[in-house]
Image (cartoon, rainbow, N blue to C red):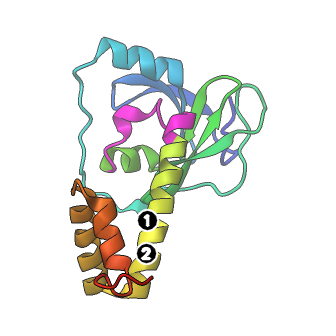
Amino acid sequence: MKCTSCKQGDLTPCFIEGQFRAHTCTHCGGNWILIEDFVAWKERNADYVFAENIAFESDEASDTKKALICPVSGAIMRKFRISSTNEHRVDYSAAVGGIWLDSGEWELLKSEGLAGSLNALVTKQWQNQIKEQSAKQSFSDIYNDKFGDETYAKVKAIRTWLESQPQRADLRAYILAEDPYSAER
């Protein structure tokens, strides 16, 4: 098979970290992994833990911006974000259940603590979770910019305390009332 990314190298059979089957490009170092191979290996090695928090700079990992073609089916692969805190994307071929990892992306997944979740990255549930976390972070950034660090920290603490109170609706009404001691609205 020819490399889907650089189009120059051949995809040769190998084992990632000597653990599960993959095909590595002889030119760019990218990896083609079938999810079924990863899942089968994971089932046989349920107690195996990939090293996490390794010293790794995320800019050491390539991230192909263009659409890639599946080296097996010839179909266009979809890009999936790996987390809400990292813009990096992996390429997935639904036609054959294969993931393309650009050079350095495997190390990036390990450093992010995601190597053991390779099969989950391409699920709708995982991607929805990333969207939800990203939206929450965006709102948090907006509030922080609007209120300032100190005020935002205080208002978050008040909000957390208020949510734990059994009479929170009455407390909210008291706080929001123009004059809580007046009978007039």
| Magenta stretch holds residue 26 | no
Identify which residue, 34 or 128, lies in the foreground: 128
Rendered position, 132 above or below 17 = below
Return the x and y of residue 149 as percentages of the image width and height. 29, 84
Q: Which residues are magenta?
A: 112-126
| Magenta stretch holds residue 117 | yes
Neighbour tally class for label 1: few under 14, some 14-19, many 20 plus, Cα within 10 Å: some
Query: Could you tell me the amino acid type at mark 1?
Result: Gln
The C terminus sits in image quarter = bottom left
Return the x and y of residue 89 as percentages of the image width and height. 55, 50
Q: Residue at x 40, y 61 (%)?
A: 58
Decide whether the magenta segment is chiefly helix, strand or loop. Answer: loop
Q: Secondary structure at mark 1?
A: helix
Residue 91 appears left or right of 132: right
Rendered position, 61 above or below 152 = above
Rendered position, 156 above or below 34 = below
Say whether residue 60 is visible.
no
Residue 61 appears left or right of 144: right
Dot 1 and dot 2 residues touching (CB under 8 Å): yes
Return the x and y of residue 72 as percentages of the image width and height. 71, 25
Identify which residue, 60 or 127, lies in the foreground: 127
Q: Residue at x 22, y 21 (%)?
A: 47
C-alpha gap between disc 1 and disc 2: 6 Å
Residue 166 appears left or right of 34: left
Query: Could you tell me the amino acid type at mark 2?
Result: Asp
Say whether residue 42 is visible.
yes
Return the x and y of residue 121 as percentages of the image width and height. 49, 38
Identify which residue, 95 or 106, lies in the foreground: 95
Residue under numbered circle 1: 137
Residue positioned most to the front: 183
Q: Residue at x 33, y 69 (%)?
A: 172
Q: Which mark is drawn over residue 141? A: 2
